[in-house]
Image: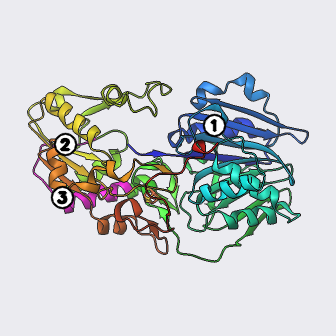
Amino acid sequence: MLKEECGIFGVFGHKDAAKLTYLGLYALQHRGQESAGIITFDHTRFRTIKEMGLVFEIFNPKNLSGLTGDMAVGHVRYSTTGSSNIKNTQPFLAETSKGTLAIAHNGNLVNAKELHGQLKSSGSIFQTALDSEIIIHLLSKSREKNLSDAFIEALKQVKGAYSLLLLDKNSLIAARDPYGFRPLCLGKLDSGWVVSSETCAFDLVGASYIRDIEPGEILLISKDGLKSIKPFPFDSHAFCIFEFIYFARPDSQISGQSVHCIRKKLGKRLAKEAPVQADLVMAVPDSGNSAALGYAQESGIPFEFGMTRNHYIGRTFIEPSQQVRDLEVKIKLNPIKEILKGKRIIVVDDSIVRGTTSRRRVSALKEAGATQVHLRISSPPIKYSCYFGIDTPQRRKLIASNKEVEEIKEFIGADSLGYLSMEGLLESAALPPQTFCTACFSGDYPIKIKDKINKFSLEEKT
Ligand code: SF4
């Protein structure tokens, strides 16, 4: 399964900033389950709580009450850059030439290695393996007096995917890279402002969705209101299409579109492109649910719950270690024998990465009594690694990078296998003038990647 890197949430001008951020992070937990943190500012000092673990494990009424202030930034993290340890948790707080700053980042910089080397050569000392620390060093070194100008100067030097929140003593600044890889949206709550990776967090805190932060936009939120700056020349946008397929929560809206409805459209299109005779349609829960519903509606074959997901597995010891993946598959999903016995089933999933998980699932469904298992995938084959904030294995480990569909079917042990076509994906998600990054399917990277063999980890260098 692919992993999202991070989720971010910020509040400006609300007396319950820490509690709202806690709830916001709760809603964004699917975007990162290894660590979480909140930094607030109460007009005298910044206050921080960051720990390894899930949001509900880290925060409680007592420690939240110590996070005073009406401004906050929060972060949930799944590590792809830097190892999974407390040192690399976010938000990151730093004393800079522009004052004390807290930063929270979702994305991945593709020129982090070069910038890190340059900064180290010029005397910078790094405390973490975070891309965000590079941005802070660049900002601090800027000769611009004004924070927003220094931030813009720093962002002009970085390449890659970033949705960022920056908090200083006077303002909350939201920024999205010119390609708009990762989502970021603005909401209003009472007289305050909230910014979130996804709108599902607004629903939980009772905020109203105002709009998306635009690709290349820097939005300054202060007591003087909102100020939007667009300092980057327009480039073609490249929103990560995988947010629609899998990463975003189905109850979120992206660019005004319901993620659940898009996923249903993917399933409907898949039913047209890859039909098969069967007794029931089921999802690999939860990520395949919406597409499976769409497949069932389009095909007229009944939808059933053929597998139950165990939501209560602790994460600390099963993520992201390779050794316990077998155990993870077994304890996460359990087939419902009474539903499956003697049936020809269509199983809808969002993607196939290495193929090993799908193989175990197909085998489990057959052991449970299914006579035929037809696997349908609501995206095209993943053939290339992601360098923009999603944890994908090296290319050679992606099953579709070196096997044809028929070979993958044989490996997985399914009776048939059908993927959604690229045309089907793009037409189902279409929202002109939105254009997408589809690089993990096509290899057509919106930004040139120098080192495609090894993803850069600052940890190797520090
Ligand atoms: S390569 Fe794939 S996962 Fe990465 S940003 Fe592009 S579409 Fe998203």
**Residue at the spot x=81%, y=66% of the render?**
149
Cα–Cα span, label 1 and label 3? 40 Å
The front one of 200 and 447 is 447
Label annotation for residue 412: 2
The front one of 429 and 131 is 131
Q: Is residue 270 magenta?
A: yes
Residue 59 lies, with reference to residue 155, above or below; the image says above
Disc 3 marks a residue whose amino acid type is Ala
The secondary structure type at the circle numbered 2 is: helix
Q: Which residue is mark 1?
A: 23
Label 2 CB, ligand 1: below 8 Å? no
In magenta, the rendered stretch is 263-283
Mark 2 vs 3: CB contact within 8 A? no
Cα–Cα span, label 1 and label 2? 40 Å
Q: Position of residue 239 (x, y in %)?
A: 50, 63
456 horizontally vs 141: left or right: left
Q: For mark 3, does the 10 Å Cα neighbourhood hold few (<14), some (14 to 19), or many (20 or more) residues?
A: some
Q: Which residue is mark 3?
A: 274
Task: Assign ligand 1 to one image quadrant.
Answer: bottom left
Q: Is residue 208 magenta?
A: no
The secondary structure type at the circle numbered 3 is: loop
Q: Quadrant of residue 305?
A: top left
Q: For mark 2, does the 10 Å Cα neighbourhood hold few (<14), some (14 to 19), or many (20 or more) residues?
A: many
Labels 1 and 2: the sequence-earlier one: 1
